[in-house]
Image (cartoon, rainbow, N blue to C red):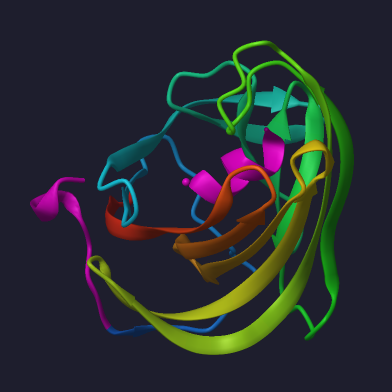
């Protein structure tokens, strides 16, 4: 699912990471450093699992330079003039731009999905999904194992209609670093109430 992949990303063992002291600057036009070899390691505080994201190659697509992730041929990221996009199967999806204003719409999506999904359906059932992302916080300090960062926050409201599921996600981005942390609170008629979060554990920029 496109928005979930964005959240996972953008969701190195200890010594590979760079620590940010003094605090990293507030947003500039460079929203995330895109370069082959850049590596991010995230830690899920809910599942206790590490997830490694590496830019492994690049290609041109529709006049843009796309940096592909983890050996995938169809999923990656690219910059606009002041915008960061995720790219999936030749479709561009805006993740964030700078500088946002409080309440400003970042991304809106309405989708009909078929197949296995994050709820664990093995039967490939049809279900409907809506989401809206808004700028929520313009400058706050977020601390993770990788360091402390000046971040701006984006709130995403998501509904999975067939499951009566409502997600509220806060995603924190730092200029020139990228995705730093996210937290999600879910209330579902089928699966109950749950919380999860992912944090930047370490990173290495080429």
Residue at the spot 55% in from the left edge and 25% down from the top edge: 120
Query: In x, y percent, where is residue 141?
Result: 42, 87
The relative height of residue 148 versus residue 184 in the rendered view (above or below) is: below
Residue at the spot 57% in from the left edge and 63% down from the top edge: 185
User: Quarter of the image containing the N terminus?
Assistant: top right
Residue at the spot 50% in from the left edge and 64% down from the top edge: 183
Q: Is residue 28 visible?
A: no
The answer to which of 15 and 44 lies nearer the viewer is 44
Query: In x, y percent, where is residue 182?
Result: 49, 63
Res 49 quadrant in image = top left
From the viewer's perspective, tell me whether residue 148 is left or right of residue 123: left
Q: Residue furthest top?
A: 123
The answer to which of 42 and 126 lies nearer the viewer is 126
The answer to which of 142 and 91 lies nearer the viewer is 142
The answer to which of 68 and 165 lies nearer the viewer is 165
Query: In x, y percent, where is residue 9?
Result: 50, 46
Query: In x, y percent, where is residue 51?
Result: 33, 39
Res 198 quadrant in image = bottom left
**Magenta stretch holds residue 138:** no
Residue at the spot 78% in from the left edge and 86% down from the top edge: 102
In this picture, which residue range is highlighted in magenta?
1-21
From the viewer's perspective, tell me whether residue 75 is left or right of residue 161: left
The relative height of residue 106 versus residue 26 in the rendered view (above or below) is: above
The relative height of residue 135 versus residue 31 in the rendered view (above or below) is: below
From the viewer's perspective, tell me whether residue 102 is left or right of residue 185: right
Q: Is residue 71 visible?
A: yes
**Magenta stretch holds residue 14:** yes
């Amino acid at each position: 699912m496109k928005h979930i992949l964005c959240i996972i990303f953008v969701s190195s063992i200890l010594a590979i990471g760079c620590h940010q002291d003094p605090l990293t600057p507030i947003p500039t036009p460079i929203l995330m450093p895109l370069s082959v070899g850049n590596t991010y390691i995230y830690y899920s505080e809910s599942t206790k699992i590490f997830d490694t994201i590496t830019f492994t190659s690049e290609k041109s697509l529709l006049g843009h330079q796309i940096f592909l992730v983890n050996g995938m041929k169809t999923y990656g990221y690219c910059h606009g003039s002041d915008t960061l996009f995720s790219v999936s199967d030749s479709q561009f999806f805006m993740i964030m731009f700078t500088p946002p204003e409080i309440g400003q719409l970042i991304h809106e999506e309405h989708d009909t999905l078929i197949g296995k999904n994050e709820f664990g359906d093995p039967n490939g059932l049809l279900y409907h999904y809506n989401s809206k992302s808004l700028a929520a916080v313009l400058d706050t300090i977020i601390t993770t194992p990788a360091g402390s960062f000046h971040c701006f926050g984006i709130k995403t409201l998501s509904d999975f209609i067939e499951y009566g599921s409502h997600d509220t996600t806060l995603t924190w981005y730092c200029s020139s670093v990228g995705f730093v942390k996210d937290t999600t609170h879910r209330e579902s008629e089928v699966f109950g109430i749950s919380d999860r979060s992912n944090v930047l554990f370490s990173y290495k920029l080429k």
